[in-house]
Each structure stands twice: as C-alpha cells, then as structure tokens.
Image (spheres, grey):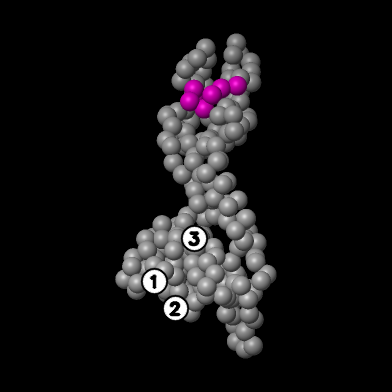
C-alpha cells in the first residue's frame, strides 16, 4: 500500500522531516488525529510532529428516496499520515496514543515466543506523498448508491413514473442503473437516473 524508502540512514535522521503512515484501529482515524494533536500540545513536541492528515475524497450518497448527501470517504481506511522528525521521543508520543497500532515499516522477527517483533518505521518519499494528496484533492465525487442487482425499485419521475421493476445493472460512475420494467406485459430494460428511483423494502 505504501512504498517504503530504502534509505535507512536518512529514515532515522532526526534532522530530516518525512511522512510516515501509522496503522490505527478501524474507524478511529479522526479520534487518533484529535488525540495526537492534543498530546503534541501537552508534551510540547510541535517542532517534532508537524502535520497529521487523513486523506479523503468526496462522495455523493444517493438515499433510498433518491435524495443526495455529499460526504467524504477515507483514501486509506485504518491509516493516519504523519509528517514528523523521527526520534525516540516523537516515536513514543505517536506509539502511545490510544488506538494507534503501529507505524508502517520493516518488522524485525522475534528470536523467541510468538507475536509481532519490533517495527522500524519507514517513511515514504516526497513524490508518493504528493501523489496521495493530489489524488484526494483532484478526485471527482464518487456516486454511492444503496442499490444492487436484484433489488426491487419504484420509478419516482419521468415517463415511467410509478412503474416497478428489478435492477439488472448499476453504473455508479454515470449515476445510472438499468431495470426491467413490466411494460405492456413484457419485461423491458430501461435506463434510469439514480434520483429517478427508490428502493422498495
């Protein structure tokens, strides 16, 4: 998921600022960001940990009644990106933040027992960081709809208003779906906009 920088000397140089990926508990990305921002202030390490980001892209959710809700979706669920000068102190501040699992890096195998060994944090390059943030910034809103093939729908508007049918194809990138509607006693495939239909329970 994240390419590793193989320059281990530079990776551990406390005078060089890098982006690191940190794995966190599922659904706790925003909580970790907030907790870490508070800890940075409290422990006075603003000069060590300089930026925390959760890259997100815009999405539009189409509800069952056809209405649309603008929202955002995480690019890397389960990860928080941190720009920091790596040192023992800064590492401890991040690692001891609630819901943080570990840095993304190289795992050193344990010589005995079970479980994970020590993970050496590995930064990713500036070009990869720029690419990640550019994807998040330039991404066109993705249409998400709570419908899938086989769902029963009712048409709300247009020439087929009040017709009922079954979804046979969903095309989110075009905000359209295809449904079989019974027209003159025959199942006829009709292309419809997401906001023209509602899902029958």
- The image's mark for residue 89 is 2
Residue 28 visible, this orientation? no
Instruction: In the displayed orientation, state which residue is furthest to the right.
Output: 6
**Quadrant housing residue 120:** bottom right
Residue for badge 3: 80
Residue 64 locus on image (x, y percent) = 45, 32
Q: Secondary structure at mark 3?
A: strand
Mark-to-mark CA distance, 3 and 1: 18 Å
The residue shown at (57%, 27%) is 176
Residue for badge 1: 45
Please say whether residue 195 is one of the residues in the magenta stretch. yes
Task: Give neighbour class at mark 3: few <14, some 14-19, many 20+ (Cα, 10 Å).
Answer: many
Q: Mark 1 or mark 2, which is nearer the start of the sequence?
A: 1
The residue shown at (60%, 58%) is 126
Q: Which residues are magenta?
A: 191-197
Q: Nearer the viewer, residue 51 or 181?
A: 51
Q: Name the quarter where the N terminus is drawn.
A: bottom right
């Amino acid at each position: 998921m994240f390419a590793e920088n193989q320059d281990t000397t530079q990776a551990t140089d406390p005078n060089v600022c890098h982006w690191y990926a940190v794995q966190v508990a599922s659904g706790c990305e925003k909580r970790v960001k907030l907790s870490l921002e508070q800890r940075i202030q409290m422990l006075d390490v603003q000069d060590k940990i300089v930026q925390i980001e959760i890259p997100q892209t815009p999405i539009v959710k189409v509800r069952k009644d056809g209405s649309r809700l603008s929202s955002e979706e995480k690019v890397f669920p389960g990860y928080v990106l941190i720009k920091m000068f790596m040192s023992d102190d800064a590492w401890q501040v991040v690692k001891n933040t609630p819901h943080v699992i570990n840095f993304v890096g190289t795992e050193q195998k344990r010589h005995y027992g079970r479980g994970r060994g020590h993970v050496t944090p590995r930064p990713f390059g500036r070009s990869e960081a720029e690419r990640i943030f550019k994807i998040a910034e330039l991404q066109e809103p993705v249409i998400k709809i709570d419908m899938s093939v086989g769902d029963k729908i009712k048409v709300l508007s247009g020439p087929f208003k009040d017709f009922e049918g079954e979804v046979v194809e969903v095309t989110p990138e075009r905000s359209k779906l295809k449904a079989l509607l019974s027209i003159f006693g025959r199942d006829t495939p009709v292309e419809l906009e997401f906001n023209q239909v509602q899902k029958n329970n």
